[in-house]
Image (tube, rainbow, N blue to C red):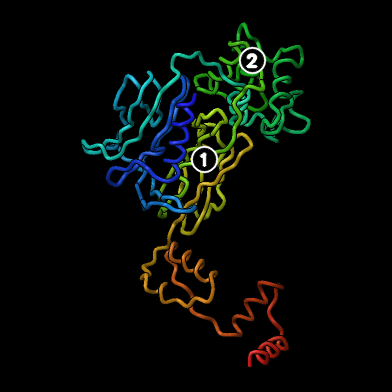
Amino acid sequence: MRLGRCFAAAVAQMSMWSSIVVGDFAILPPAFELHGRESIQRVIVVASGQQTKSTGNQLPEYGSLVQSDEMTLRSSDESVIRVEDEIVYPVGGGMANVEAWLAGHIVASATVRVDAMHLPHQWSFRNEVQSVLARQGCNMGACHGALAGKGGFRLSLRGYDADADYFTIAREVRGRRIEIADPGRSLLVAKPTGALPHKGGLRLDVNSRDYRVVSQWIADGAVGPSSDDARLTHLSVSPKQSRLRPSDQTRILVSAHYDDGRIVDVSHWAKFSATDEAVASVDDDGLVRVRGSGEAAVLVWFGSRVELARMTVPYDNAVPESVFAAAPKRNFIDEINLKQLQTLDLPPSPRVDDLAFLRRATIDTVGRLPTAAEQRRFSNELA
């Protein structure tokens, strides 16, 4: 456990301040751990972008998602990990690399550590079954998370109360919602899979990992939440910051950090929403599509925690650096403003005359144009 905590801390530090980059590409996350036979990790290949040694709160920026038929992801040791469709699966204990191959060369790599393969796995109601229910929308306000529930079945909104939800699922109505001897006949899975009529429609594919999580949890005895469960402390996203262009795409990866030192990929269970769809939109799987120039962010929600992934999309301008250096500065606000304009490749506006300033300030503060008397008084005070 101590080794796992040390490795987790190293991964967190590496993810925040640096990356493993070869050439013009990077694999994200650059290093991670797979703990147990059921752990998985999605990886992506992105343009390496602007790589600097970050200080303070400044983070490295990455470019667009690399989508090429010639780019392949491989395992350096198939006895430790295998890679299928950008998902890394554990095979055996040890260390290995995920390698990005392009034109016969390794252009990027990520380090993977696999452990605890010998331990039996049991799905957690609090951290995994509840995550499936949230991902499928079962405990949202429009479904069973509503104040009165739906069809006599009520869950806490977004799964905030695991103990109450477990009682509702496993104990209420004489426990008829789960069938340990035959998990497939449990109402908890029979309705969302369409085996029984369900007003919410088809929510769970029988061939999906989510179905396996819930059905296996039932088969293993439907164990409820306990005080020994690992608790979610915070989320991290990757890439945290991206510098993109219109029509670019990227994908947001989400990691859940637990108080037992584990860092778990929950990208497949997280919820995504864009803060400004005029700049960038995001789908249910975290795929971001850039639509226009400006700054935007994707809000990520998982397990009552939220995190932001930020995107900068500069305008198509060629502004010499000397323009920003020569721009007048009176205080630190001007410095911040000019830095932001330079980031977006927007030339600073020329200084306005006094009446234009009065007009803008009046509209911003009271929502109307200044009167003639106010203009005269303003001009007299400046004289």
Whether residue 382 is situated above or below residue 318 in the rendered picture: below
In the orientation shown, which residue stands out farthest toward the right?
148
In the orientation shown, which residue stands out farthest toward the front?
2
Q: CA distance from mark 2 to mark 1?
A: 29 Å
- Indicate the amino acid at tag 1: Ser
Report if the CB atoms under discs 2 and 1 are less than 8 Å apart. Answer: no
Question: Residue 145 occupies which quadrant of the picture?
Answer: top right
Which quarter of the rendering shows the C terminus? bottom right
Element at badge 2?
loop
Residue hosting label 1: 236
At label 2, counting other C-alpha atoms closer than 10 Å, the crowd grade (few under 14, some 14-19, many 20 or more) is: some
Element at badge 1?
strand
In the rendered image, is residue 99 in sight? yes
Whether residue 310 is situated above or below residue 12 in the rendered picture: below
Q: Is 172 on the left-hand or right-hand side of 239?
A: right
In the rendered image, is residue 247 in sight? no
Question: Residue 130 occupies which quadrant of the picture?
Answer: top right
Q: Nearer the viewer, residue 97 or 202?
A: 97
**Where is residue 173 shown, x and y percent of the image?**
77, 15
Identified at 43% across, 29% down, the residue is 33
**Where is residue 88 shown, x and y percent of the image?**
40, 27
Whether residue 343 is situated above or below residue 379 in the rendered picture: above
At label 1, counting other C-alpha atoms closer than 10 Å, the crowd grade (few under 14, some 14-19, many 20 or more) is: many
- Indicate the amino acid at tag 2: Val
Identified at 47% across, 69% down, the residue is 338
Nearest to N terminus: mark 2 or mark 1: 2
Residue hosting label 2: 223
**Where is residue 281 shown, x and y percent of the image?**
51, 48
